[in-house]
Image (tube, rainbow, N blue to C red):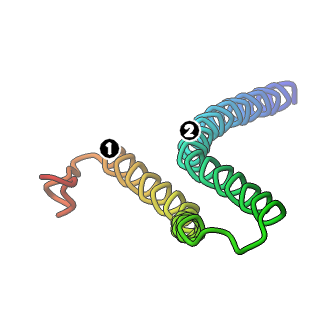
Amino acid sequence: MARILFDLLKACLNATLILLALCLFLGWKLLTATEGVSANAAEIAQQLQPMRDAVLNLQQDVAGLRGDMRVGDGPPPSARLARLEQQLSEVQDRLADILTLPQQAAASAARAGASELAARLIAATPGLGAAETGCLPPGS
């Protein structure tokens, strides 16, 4: 009876240690994934900086035109309006580009994850290499 209880205690200890190791591994993978997400967020923030500058310039031009309209009797000069329209179209183009950023980030993350999973599966399978699967890495 004591032998059975001792074996049961060892089995529980082994299961606990295996679960602990699994939790540590998953925590490590989570930290790695968050580093990748923060790198993507920094890249997106850098791409948004020119957009922010363009909007600020646009706001300043509109404020200048409003001031000119209050002071002057006639309509604002057509050259300034043409420049303002050009800036507006540039902002709209940048906004269209920004709307595609989340889709591009998700697609690149999915490709990277699938590539890493495939590499791990190939590495974990004995006797199976890239040449035997017909899946050669890009550029090969």
> Do labels 1 and 2 touch, CB within 8 Å?
no
Left or right of 63, for residue 126: left
User: Which mark is drawn over residue 123?
Assistant: 1
Residue ID for mark 2: 39
Q: Residue at x 53, y 43 (%)?
A: 43
Residue 67 versus residue 47: which sits nearer the camera?
67
Type of the residue with mark 2? Ala
Q: Position of residue 56 (x, y in %)?
A: 68, 50
Instruction: Assign the N terminus to one quadrant of the image.
Output: top right
Q: Position of residue 135 (x, y in %)?
A: 21, 61
Q: Residue at x 53, y 71 (%)?
A: 82
Q: Element under label 1?
A: helix
Q: Element under label 2?
A: helix
Type of the residue with mark 1? Ala
- Mark 1 or 2 closer to N-term? 2
The image quarter in which residue 41 lies: top right
Residue 67 versus residue 132: which sits nearer the camera?
67
Q: Is residue 95 above or below residue 43?
A: below
